[in-house]
């Protein structure tokens, strides 16, 4: 396994978007508010070119990726390293996934900013457990205005617009 900071924006887009497809189109289909799909497209076109990322390769195949950007949080007035996406190939054996996680988290911990921040949808329990195991703590729950409670007809719909914010 080798960790590599991704310099090529074309390679970043390929790994980043390729790893998202399964989650947005299969795993989370029906759980995300309509705006999240729109935001994904907007993010990938407008913000992704500014993302700094690293990938772990097994041979020539990417088996993990993490990316982020420097971000100022309004409510705390802190500058944080905002983790925009992390993915570890679920098809890999547990020992390989663990080694990939160690490499990606190590890379994150060497970012030039003291605080790390991640947003996780409330329905995404595996990711919440992941961040808690890394020492992150939830600091707030947010609603996306475009999905707002007025648009949510049931508690299940409300879960689509809830995001937990985690800090380390």
Image (cartoon, rainbow, N blue to C red):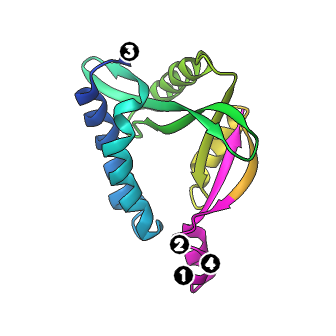
Q: Marks 4 and 2, how far apart in space?
A: 7 Å
Q: x%, y% of residue 58?
A: 33, 20
Disc number placed over residue 147 in the picture, else none: 2
Task: Say if mark 3 contacts mark 2, CB within 8 Å.
Answer: no
Relative to 85, is 144 on the left or the right?
right
Q: Which residue is mark 3?
A: 4
Asked if the stretch drawn in magenta spans residue 152, the answer is yes
Q: Which of pointers 3 and 2 lies earlier in the amino acid sequence?
A: 3
Question: Which span of residues is magenta-colored?
Answer: 142-168
Determine if the magenta segment contains residue 63: no
Specify which label sits upstream in the sequence, 3 or 1: 3
Q: Check if mark 1's residue and mark 4's residue have beta carbons within 8 Å.
A: yes
Q: Categorize mark 4 by other alpha carbons within 10 Å: few (<14), some (14-19), many (20+).
A: some
What is the distance, in whole Å, between disc 4 and disc 3 at their CAs? 42 Å
Task: Please report whichever mark, 4 or 3, sits nearer to the chain's N-terminal start.
Answer: 3
Mark drawn on residue 151: 1
Q: Quadrant of residue 155?
A: bottom right
Which is nearer the eye, 6 or 59?
6
As helix, strand or loop, the secondary structure at mark 3 comes to strand
Q: Residue at x 65, y 45 (%)?
A: 129
- Residue drawn at 64 percent across, 21 percent down: 113
Q: Please say whether residue 1 is visible from this viewpoint.
A: no
Could you say whether the residue bearing mark 1 is in a helix, strand or loop? helix
Structural distance between the alpha carbons of marks 1 and 4: 5 Å
Nearer to us of marks 4 and 3 is 4
Q: Using the image, tell me which numbered label, if any, was put on residue 149.
A: 4
Is disc 1 in contact with disc 2, using a CB cutoff of under 8 Å? yes
């Amino acid at each position: 396994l080798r960790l590599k900071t991704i310099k090529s924006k074309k390679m970043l887009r390929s790994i980043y978007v390729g790893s998202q497809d399964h989650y947005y189109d299969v795993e989370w289909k029906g759980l995300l508010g309509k705006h999240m799909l729109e935001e994904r497209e907007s993010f990938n076109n407008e913000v992704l070119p500014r993302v700094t990322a690293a990938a772990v390769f097994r041979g020539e195949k990417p088996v993990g990726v993490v990316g982020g950007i420097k971000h100022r949080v309004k409510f705390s007035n802190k500058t944080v390293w905002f983790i925009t996406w992390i993915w570890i190939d679920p098809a890999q054996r547990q020992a390989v996934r663990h080694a990939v996680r160690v490499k990606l988290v190590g890379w994150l911990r060497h970012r030039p900013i003291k605080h790390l921040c991640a947003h996780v949808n409330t329905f995404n329990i595996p990711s919440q457990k992941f961040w808690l195991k890394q020492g992150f703590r939830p600091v707030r729950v947010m609603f996306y205005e475009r999905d707002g409670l007025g648009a949510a007809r049931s508690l299940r719909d409300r879960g689509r617009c809830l995001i937990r914010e985690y800090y380390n």
